[in-house]
Amino acid sequence: MVTEAERIDSPDTDDQVPTVRDEEGRLSGEFLDLVETAIANTDAPQLKELVGDLHEADVGDLIETLDADERGPFVQLLGEDFDFAALTELDESVRLKLLEELPAETLAEGIGELESDDAVYILEDLDAENQAAILEQLPYSDRVQLQRSLDYPEESAGRLMQTDFIAVPPFWSVGQTIDYMREAEELPDTFHEIFVVDPGFRLLGSVPLDKILRTKRATKISEIMDEDAQPFEATEDREEVARSFERYNMVSAAVVDDAGRLVGMLMVDDIVDVIQEEAEEDLRALAGLGDEEISDDFIVTARSRFTWLVVNLGTAILASLVISLFEGTIEAMVALAVLMPIVASMGGNAGTQTMTVAVRALATQELDARNLWRVLRREVLVSLLNGFGLAVLIGIASAMWFSNTALGAVIGVAIVINMIFAGLSGLMIPVVLEKVKVDPAIASSVFVTTVTDVIGFFAFLGIAALWFNLPL
């Protein structure tokens, strides 16, 4: 495998080409130029020499960096040397467009060589017709395994599991098990434990590999197996599975069907991907971006963003209506128009801070009814402390700016009020949304911003009108 620090020899000259990645970890510009030249010249030997030994993650990055019209020829020039596992490293939009360019025969051949979980990951993005066309060209046993995984819900453990695993009966000895692993031709590429099953293939327990290697050959598997290992059901939500892996520091786990029969295993590398995807999904949702990828075209991107921009437009109009209630107040004291965005902005930022923590805590099940009031009390105290601190700073600055001490006091009080509501809404809005079965990551930001804008403007302008006896 070519690493960042290694160089690869050109087949045509004695010169050495640049490293695959530069010091910052990006794909080297000179390396990319050589790859693009090889594609343009349909020079398969040169291309294979350049990328044939790269890790699948590097190949995935390379494909995404290439122009759209270079990706199909890149795969076809590599032929049998192309590792289809690299497709799992691509953004969904890039992967789908590339799959559309490749013949079904090529896809079937490449997918047939993958681990079952990687094969399912690629197939699940295709429509039913294309899935069927590829599955028909696979051996019967592979086709049945993949189709069974595809029949499980999209976000389930069944879609994530690997159907290649090692299962042995409890009456086998350690020696028999070791001999079986040595002689069997088709074994998973990577595994950390062996599962123990009864004649009906129901899971009885598991044995870690290190325990097998440390046990005498004559010992029965039933004597050393862990009967307390808890499998996951194939229909279980993958986010719940990932949370269990993270909580209990798991490396692998069994997957069973509704009858308790062993149907697959989960590996930590796939769980890491799930954790990353869920975190990215929450982050995008907080900004109203849905499942947008950096590789999406501008039409798709604009459409995905437009809905939430319209919603934000509605909340902005609501805030403007509040301001319109105090037209006479603002006309009588223009300084209010200069300062009121500060009040709303500080409340919005504080609310977003609390909301981000709350949404993540709900997603990881760290926030529930048991500790809600304790967390709420903490957020109120934090809001009060920060509110008083900001009130002093902004109040002094405003008093000096407009030579009006009373105005500094008014904005200081408004800041404290808005900060308290920011903390309350930043915590309670996500909690309420989750209770009514609305994704708090998607909807919270709109409501929190609305609350802080409306309360901020109303508090500042209302207090100013009362304090200075200004008309509404």
Image: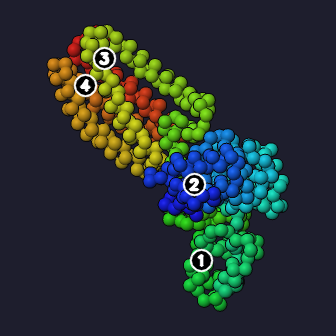
The three-letter amino acid code for the residue at tag 1 is Leu
Gap between marks 4 and 2, in whole Å? 54 Å
Say which residue appears at 65% left-offset and 55% top-offset. 46
Mark 2 and mark 1 in contact (Cβ < 8 Å)? no
Residue 38 position, x and y percent, is 65, 49
The three-letter amino acid code for the residue at tag 2 is Asp
Residue 411 badge = 4
160 lies above or below 393? below
Residue under label 1, please give it. Answer: 209
Q: As drawn, is 23 to the left or to the right of 48? A: left
Residue under label 2, please give it. Answer: 58
Q: Secondary structure at mark 3?
A: helix
Q: Residues within 10 Å of mark 2 (few under 14, many from 20)?
A: many
Mark 1 and mark 4 in contact (Cβ < 8 Å)? no
Residue 337 badge = 3
Q: Earlier in the sequence, mark 4 or mark 1?
A: 1
The three-letter amino acid code for the residue at tag 4 is Ile
Judged by depth in the image, the label closer to the viewer, 4 or 2, is: 2
Q: Quadrant of the N terminus?
A: bottom right
Q: Earlier in the sequence, mark 4 or mark 3?
A: 3
